[in-house]
Image: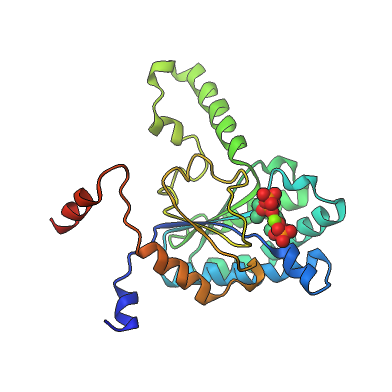
Amino acid sequence: MTEAQDKKNRILPRHVAVVMDGNGRWANKRHLPRAMGHKAGVNSTRKIVENCVKEKIAALTIFAFSSENWARPKAEVSALMSLFVSTITSEVKKLSKNNVRVQFIGDRKRFSEKLQSKINAAEESTKNNTGLHLYIAANYGGRWDVVNACRLLINDAQHDGRTAEDIDEALFDSYMSLSESPAPDLFIRTGGEQRISNFLIWQLAYSELYFVDVLWPDFSDKDFDEALSWYSGKQRRFGKTGQQVLEEQST
Ligand code: IPE
Ligand code: IPE
Ligand code: MG
């Protein structure tokens, strides 16, 4: 088979989740301030969004700022906040033109009024788009997500009369972030570390995990393409045997 045919026959993920790591090291290597690494990272983010649109992938979740990242030096946190404001402002129109629906996950209450209003406006202006569902994880933590779901569920239970016995995985999941989309099929982390860093701890239960040394600002179209091909070669068994999966595929 030719490379083009191979590509056409690939099985693509419906949902990709990405830890965009390595901006600081990218800047350090160039003797630049870390903030320049974050700025350079925005180009890679734009590219992966465009590639997901092109490949008609249903959902993309990107980790922009973790609940732990507040512990960074003040100047870096404030550079990141300014970058979020300017990036949302400059990108939203084009995203909307590409039929992308933008949604933020995480506790937005800790952000400035200005950033919160940019976030709300971006969500509002893209809410009827039917293409790529882009989730931006900002002040997000997987543990926060679980605790938040518990809080929401208990609040509802006080009104709808549900008891502990009524709670199952599907109901719990409906209170978690990303519940409108299938769980991520493919998780990508750049920057060489092989850890989850409190990203989607519930939703990644059965994702294929792909770690790559490339630093996020260097992550290219080709790097994404390689991740998609790697994913396509995986047999997803969900607890079954390989033989069972093959038999199911042939019927
Ligand atoms: C990821 O890059 C971006 C954010 C956490 C906002 P880093 O800033 O963590 O880059 P490294 O890991 O220091 O290279
Ligand atoms: C995870 O990267 C968070 C984001 C990419 C936004 P970190 O660089 O903060 O992760 P750790 O702290 O090294 O695990
Ligand atoms: Mg890092």
Identify the image quadrant of residue 141.
Answer: top right
Q: Nearer the viewer, residue 247 or 174?
A: 247
Give x and y (percent) for residue 1: 26, 81
Question: Can residue 227 be seen in the rendering of this structure?
Answer: yes
Give x and y (percent) for residue 243: 20, 51
Q: Residue at position x 63%, y 73% from top?
A: 218
Q: Residue at position x 45%, y 42% from top?
A: 205
Q: Judge from the rendering whether residue 102 lies leftward or rightward of residue 118; answer left or right.
A: left
Question: Can residue 97 be seen in the rendering of this structure?
Answer: no
Give x and y (percent) for residue 65: 68, 51
Q: Residue at position x 47%, y 43% from top?
A: 203
Q: Residue at position x 57%, y 26% from top?
A: 151
Q: Nearer the viewer, residue 161 or 167?
A: 167
For the C terminus, the image quarter is: bottom left
In the image, residue 61 sits, relative to residue 214, either above or below, namely above
In the image, residue 247 sits, relative to residue 68, either above or below, namely below
In the image, residue 201 sits, relative to residue 218, either above or below, namely above
Give x and y (percent) for residue 76: 82, 56
Q: Nearer the viewer, residue 70 or 171?
A: 70
In the image, residue 31 sits, relative to residue 132, either above or below, namely below
Q: How is the image coloured?
A: rainbow
Identify the image quadrant of residue 41.
Answer: bottom right
Identify the image quadrant of residue 229.
Answer: bottom left
Q: Judge from the rendering whether residue 181 lies leftward or rightward of residue 88; answer left or right.
A: left
Number of disc labels:
0
Q: In which of the image's four quarters is ligand 1 placed?
A: bottom right
